[in-house]
Image (spheres, grey):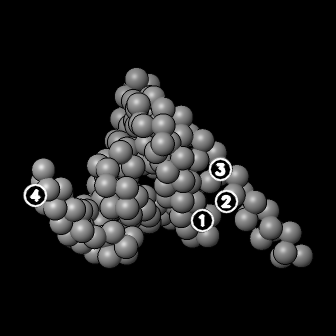
Amino acid sequence: MAFPYKRRRFMSIIAQSTFSFFACLFFAIIYKTPKSELVACGITGAFGYGAYYTYYVNTNEPMFATFIGAVTVAFIAKLYASSRKLPVMLYVLPPIFPLVPGANIYYAAYGVIMENIPYAVANGVRAFKLSGLCVIALLIIFSIPDEIFDIITGVSRFNIVEKEENNSIKN
């Protein structure tokens, strides 16, 4: 009897990741990401939100799940940026969108409007914590030197510099 439940959970994770892919893809279009990088933004968002949702479904702990999702987004974004030699923020901004605690910010504002201050403060603090965890995760991954990601992706910065020097010598 446990099998159908696990299958349903797995299908839910796949569905959430698919929706996240399209959300990040469309946000990247709004953000005017180059067309060749739209799918990469969608894939990064799908894996990031997939990691978040998988952890959240299994533990019901949104704080660490957000951290795991943001670490996944930052790591994959650094890999894409290293392999394609483009700015890393191109791959971070659209995919981090599903992890932003927008509902908590909304409920905090709603609590203020309805004059339910404890409710507003609780949701505001939670939104601040979740946003802070996203920032900390990005800082941790961005503090890893780019050379390590170059090794992982098989791209060498020195070959690019040598080719440019050889071209300038020939000219």
Q: Nearer the viewer, mark 1 or mark 4?
A: 4
Sequence-first tag of 1 and 2: 2
Q: Which residue is mark 2?
A: 13
C-beta proximity under 8 Å, tags 3 and 2: no
Q: Amino acid at mark 3?
A: Thr
Residue 89 x %, y % = 31, 47
* Mark 2 crowdedness (10 Å alpha carbons): few <14, some 14-19, many ≥20: some
Which residue in the structure is indicated by mark 4? 169
Is the residue under label 2 in contact with that under label 1 (CB below 8 Å)? yes
Q: Can the viewer see residue 149?
A: no
Helix, strand or loop under label 3: helix
Find residue 18 and name its label: 3
Q: Say which amino acid is labelled 4.
A: Ile
Mark-to-mark CA distance, 1 and 2: 6 Å
Which residue, as the protein is rendered here, is positioned at the far right? 1
Residue situated furthest top in the rendering:
113
